Image (cartoon, rainbow, N blue to C red):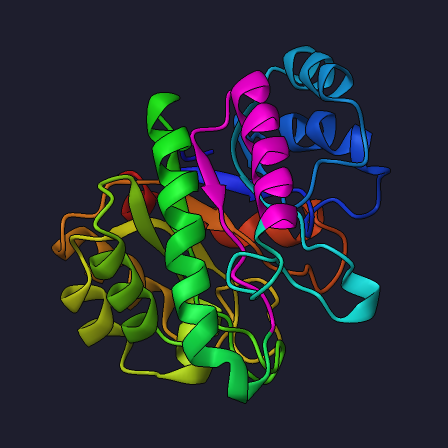
Amino acid sequence: MSNRLTANVSFLFEEFPFIDRFDAAYAAGFGLVECHFPYGMPVDVLKGRLEKAAVRLTGINTSPGDAGAGEWGLGGVPGRQRDFIAHFDEALRYACRLGSNTIHVMAGVVESSERPAARETLLENLKYAAARARDEGITLLLEPLNKRDRPGYLLSTTDEVAEIIASAGARNLALLFDIYHVQIMEGDLTTRLERYRDIIGHVQISAVPDRGEPDCSEVALGHILGTLDAIGYSGLIGLEYRPRGSTTAGLGWIEGFASALRK
């Protein structure tokens, strides 16, 4: 298995209870994992299971808040700064204890009329979060999410994320470039990868439009991997896709791209 691939166990290995997915990832050949929201389990329990499975956690998200009520993060939600700080502090505690060196700061869903205030709220919250994360050597990621899957989300394009990163001015802020979301919202993937090469901190891949295994997609995976190599991206590539069958049965695509993934 390529040492650049990190298995997103919030999507992969759903055949298993969450706590058993680290072992399943290792058994499938992965040494690296990422997940969305680890907060349903005590941090020391998770740490023990990661160590038992001999896999390293590379990234987590801040809490979505009340997802059942439509919340999807609080980073840019006006009036919820106190709640955001509590959520971020929790994420930082988990990241430090579990060894994760990135945290995806979820910006949140807001009404159109709130967007100017939401931008200022996000910048205010990032000032706090980036300073705290910097002390721990952790990079904060901002990800644009497509409006079809997540209507009302504050950040939906790479341009919006790049502007926030530039305005915040923190060196430990980076763009999470998810091929699935960017293709749906913007397309022109090669140009956008080239344009934002200096601020890309993580890449995630999946098929478009069904978010399955990335080798069967309207996007040519070989071209994307070649472009990442051409722009000098040598970081991790997260497998954030929903298997069309069992996770393990669907991993055969990796062998066909082994040489590109070694670069």
Assign the C terminus to one quadrant of the image.
Answer: top left
Give yes or no for residue 181 being in the magenta stretch: no
Does residue 231 appear anywhere in the picture?
Answer: yes
Q: How many labels does the image show?
A: 0
Where's residue 173, x and y in %? 31, 46
- Outermost residue, bottom side: 113
> Range of the magenta residues?
82-109
Relative side of 151 to 142, left or right: right
Q: Is residue 15 left or right of residue 80?
A: right
Q: Does 174 appear above or below 32?
A: below
Judge left or right: residue 175 versus residue 263.
Answer: right
The spot of residue 63 in percent (x, y) is 66, 47
Residue under the image location 35 percent in, 45 percent down: 127
Let me know if residue 87 is in the magenta part. Answer: yes
Image point (25%, 68%), residue name: 163
Nearer the observer, 217 or 158: 158
Q: Give whichever of 87, 262 is nearer the camera.
A: 87
Q: Quadrant of residue 136?
A: top left
**Towards the viewer: 197 or 42:** 42
Which secondary structure is most common in the magenta stretch? helix
> What residue sits 47% from the left and 33% below the top?
1
- Residue 170: x, y in percent? 25, 44
Residue 99 against residue 101 in the figure, above or below: above
How far across and down, in percent of the image, does residue 132 sit? 41, 30
Can residue 156 be seen from the camera position used here? no
The residue that appears at 56% across and 66% down in the rendered structure is: 78
Give the side of residue 210 with respect to residue 203, left or right.
right
